[in-house]
Image: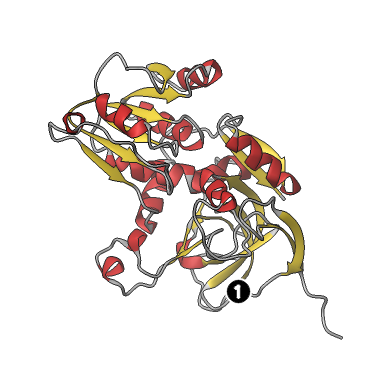
Amino acid sequence: MSATPLTMRAMQLDRPGRPLRLTQRPVASPNPEELLVEVSACGVCRTDLHVVDGDITGKLPIVPGHEIVGRVIAMGGNVRQFAVGQRIGIPWLGHTCGHCLYCSLGEENLCDDPQFTGFTRDGGFASHVVADARYCYAIPDRFSDAEAAPLLCAGLIGYRSLRMAGGAQRIGFYGFGAAAHILTQIAVWQKREVYAFVKPGDQAGEHFARSLGCVWAGGSDETPPFELDAAIIFAPVGELVPLALRALRKGGRVICAGIHMSDIPAFPYRDLWHEKCIRSVANLTRRDGEEFFDLLTRAPVESVVTIFPLEAANEALDQLRAGQIEGAAVLIP
């Protein structure tokens, strides 16, 4: 008599702009390089909003979610770096081809034939997920499952953005959500000055930013008291780019950290002159993850999270869209 197949619950996107739908389906078996993971927590990222709202389009139907923490319950025969029962993290970058120009140059974040968790392969808004073991990470023990979840994208992409800021001592964060609240703690630990730009009139956001060590917090339409060495834009708002450029010193840089942004309006060349630059961040590399999680063994970072049950994924997305989440939203199956 055959065993009853394992089933899973998942919040599935059938069409952009529609609410996610709770489904039940058989759990897939991992291939030789993969892990089957029971999900403990999954962060709700702004990229998930872009997938659900149709700002970026990929495979459908799809289970979103790419800030996944869970425990290995089965492994493919070629997996050596993890063990059954081990807690792991699964990020946005789910697979790369390994042989295109960019992979050969060590720039796998720009791979010509990638897979992305929760976008081109099913993600963590579910009770179970299958992931390529080569793109997963061990999670530092000091973080709970819920606290660790936003580290897998808000933290990782934020870290890559912070690296692009180089040695900037005065750094501005435009949009003070999941990524900025993690990166502020790292930057303050590194003895940088952090300037937080929130939605105009958001006094709670200003207070939250100052509580994490920001030396100044104000509306995104305000001018900071000093010129900035660099600015990282986390909010998907193109109008912030010219504002950030005007806040920079000569030679400063603006880093656009999101996967999607509204159009950048025209601005005078003088705002870009004096060797200022604008740069985007695309995805992450496995090296970024290794460096970031090593850094977290020393940096005193704490994630601020609001927890929702898996079935309340649509509510979590709505609150994120409305800017009502302080820190990060996390789903618990």
- Residue 61 lies, with reference to residue 317, above or below; the image says below
- Furthest residue toward top: 225
Q: Residues within 10 Å of mark 1 (few under 14, many from 20)?
A: some
Q: Is residue 292 left or right of residue 67?
A: left
Q: Is residue 224 left or right of residue 261?
A: left
- Furthest residue toward bottom: 1
- Furthest residue toward right: 1
Q: Is residue 81 left or right of residue 1?
A: left
Q: Image quarter for residue 254?
A: top left
Which residue corresponds to mark 1? 30
Q: Image quarter for residue 150?
A: top right
SS type, badge 1: loop
Residue at 70% over, 40% down: 315
**296 vs 6, nearest the viewer:** 6
Q: Is residue 86 visible?
A: yes
Q: List x then y, in percent, for residue 241.
A: 33, 34
- Residue 179 lies, with reference to residue 206, above or below; the image says below
Residue at 35% over, 68% down: 112
- Residue 172 lies, with reference to residue 253, above or below; the image says above
Q: Is residue 169 visible?
A: no
Amino acid type shown at disc 1 = Pro
**6 vs 63, nearest the viewer:** 63
Residue at 60% over, 65% down: 60
Residue at 52% over, 19% down: 202
